[in-house]
Image: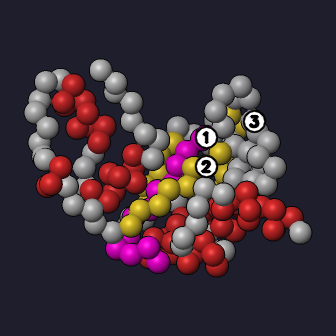
């Protein structure tokens, strides 16, 4: 049986109210799925920023010791991470050190909530991609929506000019 969960599962959890990991464990233990597909309702908008230990614009890894870790908080803000103050980010593994996920009734409110969460986040001692996320969440075309899989690379090219 394949038991993988997508890395973006918190987005689905926030808009459905379903704890996917807990449900998966219960079903694997033999319990019946407690809902049908038709019973699942989507509520609001959720967005996720992966926080990586890397240069925000060259994407070069930035391993090392996190001298200060202060994650954001508040209503509609979720942080999934294993990092903490004095955590050492190793040089030979995935650079993701956490995810900031927000949920709000509308896309506009979710964007504002993510901007606030990114501004509240403090990670010192290493470089992270949070400055990149801050710029993107202030960028007019992103705010309007309609982006595609080439959006970031096109935006980065324009940014260098």
- The foreground one among 81 and 52 is 52
Say left or right for 29 vs 92.
left
Residue at 52 percent across and 59 percent down: it is: 72
Contact between labelled residues 1 and 3, with CB atoms less than 8 Å apart: no
Write down the residue under mark 2: 51
Q: State the CA–CA distance, disc 2 to disc 3.
A: 15 Å
Q: Position of residue 51 (x, y in %)?
A: 61, 49
Name above or below for residue 85 compared with residue 46: above
Seen as rendered, the residue at the extreme right is 161
Write down the residue under mark 3: 64
Magenta-colored stretch includes residue 106: yes
Name above or below for residue 97 compared with residue 74: above
Q: Is residue 126 visible?
A: no
User: What SS does tag 2 mark?
Assistant: strand
Residue 35, numbered circle:
none
- Mark 3 and mark 1 lie on one chain; the one further toward the N terminus is 3
Q: State the CA–CA distance, disc 3 to disc 1.
A: 13 Å
Front disc: 3 or 1: 1
The picture quadrant where one finds residue 57 is bottom right
**Coloration of the structure image:** secondary structure
The picture quadrant where one finds residue 104 is bottom left
What span is colored magenta in the figure?
96-108
Name above or below for residue 149 compared with residue 139: above
Write down the residue under mark 1: 96
- The foreground one among 98 and 132 is 132
Say few, some or many: other residues with alpha carbon within 10 Å of mark 1 (under 14 / 14 to 19 / 20 or more).
some
Front disc: 2 or 3: 2
């Amino acid at each position: 049986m394949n038991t993988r969960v997508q890395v973006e599962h918190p987005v689905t959890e926030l808009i459905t109210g379903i704890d996917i990991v807990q449900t998966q464990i219960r079903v694997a233990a033999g319990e019946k799925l407690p809902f049908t597909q038709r019973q699942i309702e989507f509520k609001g908008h959720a967005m996720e920023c992966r926080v990586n230990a890397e240069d925000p614009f060259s994407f070069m890894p930035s391993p090392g010791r996190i001298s200060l870790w202060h994650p954001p908080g508040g209503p509609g803000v979720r942080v999934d991470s294993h990092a903490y103050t004095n955590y050492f980010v190793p040089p030979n593994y995935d650079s993701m050190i956490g995810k900031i996920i927000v949920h709000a009734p509308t896309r506009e409110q979710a964007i504002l909530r993510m901007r606030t969460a990114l501004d509240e986040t403090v990670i010192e001692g290493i470089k992270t991609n949070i400055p990149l996320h801050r710029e993107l969440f202030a960028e007019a075309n992103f705010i309007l929506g309609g982006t595609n899989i080439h959006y970031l690379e096109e935006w980065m090219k324009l940014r260098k000019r």
